[in-house]
Image (cartoon, rainbow, N blue to C red):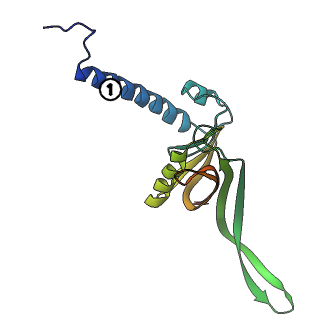
Amino acid sequence: MRFPPSLNLPFDKARGRIDQVRSDARRLDDLFGALSATPTRDTSALRTAGLPQGTELMVLGMFVFGMKSLPYQEFQRRMSWRHATSERHTERPAAQYVGLGEDTVSFTGVLVPEVAGSFSAIDNLVDMASTGDNWPLLDGAGQIWGCYRIENIDLKGTSIIAGGIARRTEFAVDLVRQD
């Protein structure tokens, strides 16, 4: 027995949701294919993955820093190298290179959901930090920076409205390289 398409049956909603999930899965497959490609400054792989150009700033794991999620205004990267020293009589200390040191990245910005970003983006970063996992960091051009863990998240809310919600949230996210 066939039902006319005008009837709104419970499984019609489920079928629409399944189609949406399949579409999202294909888009994620395209995105992973583009992001796992050899690092390059050519952004054509990102365009073919269906990403809108100019809105993604940086990707940490599955979290996208961008105009729709959490746009940062500044970032700072600090890289260091280690040198062991030993004292010498009547001479300067002798130094020998012993390897890579810390590599840290900090993002700072202001979240104003009425303009750009969303409150849930900070919650997503907190959830990622709570796992203690390392996440690959890629810039908007597809260059892989390495695997980083979230070390700190600082938040400062201003312009508080009813319900204790901040209309403007200053944030800082500190990452430390782990690979």
Q: How many marks?
A: 1
Q: Residue at x 37, y 29 (%)?
A: 21
Image coordinates of residue 87 in percent, x first then y, are 77, 88
Q: Nearer the viewer, residue 179 or 29?
A: 29
On-image quarter of the C terminus: bottom right
Residue occupying the far front of the picture: 162
Residue occupying the far right of the picture: 90
Quadrant in which residue 139 is drawn: top right
The answer to whether residue 15 is left or right of residue 162 is: left
- Name the amino acid type tagged 1: Ile
Image coordinates of residue 112 in percent, x first then y, are 64, 44
**Can the viewer see residue 179 in this picture?**
no
Image coordinates of residue 174 in percent, x first then y, are 62, 59
Q: Residue at x 54, y 46 (%)?
A: 119
Secondary structure under badge 1? helix
Q: Nearer the viewer, residue 32 or 156?
A: 156
Q: Residue at x 23, y 19 (%)?
A: 9
Q: Residue at x 55, y 59 (%)?
A: 150
Residue occupying the far left of the picture: 1
Residue holding disc 1: 18
**Can the viewer see residue 126 in this picture?**
yes
Image coordinates of residue 89 in percent, x first then y, are 82, 93
Q: Nearer the viewer, residue 17 or 10?
A: 10
Residue occupying the far bottom of the picture: 89
Query: Dot 1: few (<14), some (14–19), or many (≥20) neighbours within 10 Å?
Result: few
Q: Is residue 130 above or below residue 84?
A: above
On-image quarter of the N terminus: top left
Q: Nearer the viewer, residue 112 or 141?
A: 112
Quadrant in which residue 54 is drawn: top right
The answer to whether residue 158 is left or right of residue 10 is: right
